Amino acid sequence: MKLSTNKPIAFFDLETTGTNPVKDRIVEIAILKINTDGSETWYEQRVNPGIPIPKETSEIHGIYDEDVRDMPEFKSIAKNVELFLRDCDLAGFNMKRFDLPLLMQSFVSAEIDFKINKRRLVDVQRIFHKMEPRNLTAALKFYCNETLINSHSAKADTQATYDVFKAQLSHYS
């Protein structure tokens, strides 16, 4: 399916020093801008966070202190990032809860006025969770190919939970 928009949309992801949008810092940013004509433009940059990257975090994303030691700090690329994102709607996976708050905090620290009030925000994770429910009814259907009858009756929910657990034990060795 070709994406048709009346305004560019920028899909982005951040790799960071941790999971706290207020105290942690960006170590890598990637942005894929889909222009109104359907063309795609990339912006990618590793970033020196100015603080050590915890070992357990590096083991997740594979970026270590020595990989970003000679990279620019975010404040030195912030204006380029803002220009790349200017007039774009924004999209990402878990973007509203993590990536966007951290990006906005990074812009504040760099003294760049980055506004989101006139942008559409698309969190692909929220669409996934809405369209592919993650509840007991969905689990019973997925693992046991059964329909939950009397959902929210304690007995039916308890039986379904046990059935899902047994199926999980078989499914995941």
Image: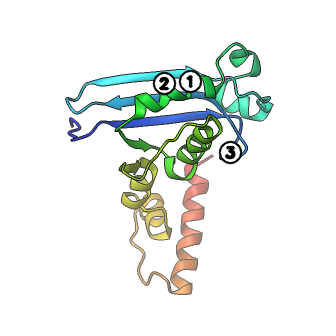
Q: Helix or strand or loop: what does disc 2 sit on?
A: helix
* Tag 1 residue: 77
73 or 165: nearer the viewer: 73
Q: Which mark is residue 19?
A: 3
Res 68 quadrant in image: top right
Q: Is residue 131 above or below residue 43?
A: below
27 or 87: nearer the viewer: 87
Structural distance between the alpha carbons of marks 2 and 1: 5 Å
Q: Earlier in the sequence, mark 3 or mark 1?
A: 3
Res 103 quadrant in image: top right
Q: Which mark is residue 109?
A: none
Residue 127 lies, in percent from the top left, at: 39, 54
Structural distance between the alpha carbons of marks 3 and 2: 24 Å
Which amino acid type is shown beneath numbered disc 1?
Ile
Which amino acid type is shown beneath numbered disc 3?
Thr
Quarter holding the N terminus?
A: top left
Number of residues whose C-alpha sits closer than 10 Å to that of mark 1, classed few (under 14), some (14–19) or many (20 or more): few
Marks 3, 1: nearer the viewer: 1
Which amino acid type is shown beneath numbered disc 2?
Asn
Q: Helix or strand or loop: what does disc 3 sit on?
A: loop
Q: Is residue 162 left or right of residue 139?
A: right
Q: Is residue 118 above or below residue 161?
A: above
* Tag 2 residue: 80
Q: Earlier in the sequence, mark 3 or mark 2?
A: 3
Q: Is residue 52 above or below residue 124?
A: above
Structural distance between the alpha carbons of marks 3 and 1: 22 Å
Residue in view at x 40 percent, y 50 percent? 121
Q: Is residue 18 left or right of residue 107?
A: right
Badges 3 and 2: C-beta atoms under 8 Å apart? no
